[in-house]
Amino acid sequence: MSIASVVYTNSVNSDVIKVFKNQYKKHCKIPLFTVSDKDADHVYKNEEPYYKHWINALEKIEEDYFIYNQDDFFLYDDVDTAKIHELVKTLESSSWPYIRLIKTGSNLSVSKPLIEENNLYEVGTDSFPQYSMQATIWKKDKFIELYNKTKAEKWFECDAYEQVCKESNLTGLYYYNNEPLRGARHYDSTIYPYIATAVVRGQWNTKEYESELSDILSKNNIDIDKRGRFL
C-alpha cells in the first residue's frame, strides 16, 4: 500500500505552482508528482486533450493510490499523514473508488458506510457533483477508468463526468469531522488543510481565505495586486 500526491498545473500559472510547491513541502511528507506543459515530472503537450494529460501522467507513477491536487490547493497547515494512510487502507480493503478529503457539493448523503471510520460518509447518488475536482484520495485505476470514459477535452467539471459516474455507478466517500463551512457549499478539512481554491476567475480568492492567503502570499514574495483580489 503506497500513495503519491499529484498536482496538475500549466506554465501560465507559474506564480501559483511556485506557492503550491513551497506550501506542500512545508506541510506534507507524501511524495509529490507534478504534471505540466513545462518543467514537471510529466510534461504534456497543450494540444493534447486534457484527459490524456492525466492518464499519461498516472501511468508513470508506481503508486496505486494518489491524492488529486490542482495548483491552487495551497496547504496552510500540516497534513495528517497518519490519517491519510488509514484512509488508503480503507480503500484498499473495500470497493469504494475514492475518498474526498473535504466535504463539498450539494445534496450530500449523511449515510455511513459499513466500515470502522466514524468520519466517513457516502457521497450518495443524488449528490452534485458526482465527480468533484477537490482534494481526493483515488484508486488510480478507477480514476483512469473514469477519465478514459469521459474523454474531457478541456479542464473543467462538465456534464460528461456526471453521466459517466451515473452510468458506471461510480460514487465514493467523503471525510467530515464537523469542520466549519467555508464557502457556499464546501467545508474546511482538518486532515488536509488546504485553500479550496486560491484562484477564482484569475484572481486571488480573498473572499473566502483572506487571512490564509495574505499570510501565504506574503511569505512567498507574491504581489497580491498583480492578479488582484476576488471579493
Image (cartoon, helix red, strand yellow):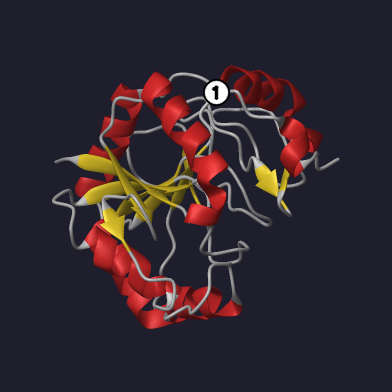
Q: Is residue 42 above or below residue 194?
A: below
User: Which residue corresponds to the image point at 26% horizontal and 42% vertical from the top-left?
Assistant: 4
Q: Is residue 41 above or below residue 207?
A: below
Quadrant assignment, res 150:
bottom left
Where residue 221 sits in the image (x, y, percent)? Answer: 60, 23
Placement of the C terminus among the 4 image quadrants: top right
User: Which residue corresponds to the image point at 73% horizontal and 32% vertical from the top-left?
Assistant: 224
- Apparent side of residue 103 relative to residue 4 in the rendered image (left or right): right
- Apparent side of residue 71 relative to residue 138 in the rendered image (left or right): right
User: Which residue corresponds to the image point at 61% horizontal and 61% vertical from the top-left?
Assistant: 127
> Counting other residues with Cα less than 10 Å from the Cα at mark 1, is it few (<14), some (14-19), or many (20 or more)?
some
Considering every residue shown, the one lying at the far right of the view is 231
Q: Can residue 72 be seen?
A: no
Q: Is residue 33 above or below residue 172?
A: above
Which secondary structure, mark 1? Answer: loop
- Apparent side of residue 27 relative to residue 132 in the rendered image (left or right): left
- Choose between 138 and 25: the one closer to the eye: 25
User: Residue at label 1?
Assistant: 76
- Choose between 25 and 167: the one closer to the eye: 25
- Choose between 86 and 10: the one closer to the eye: 10
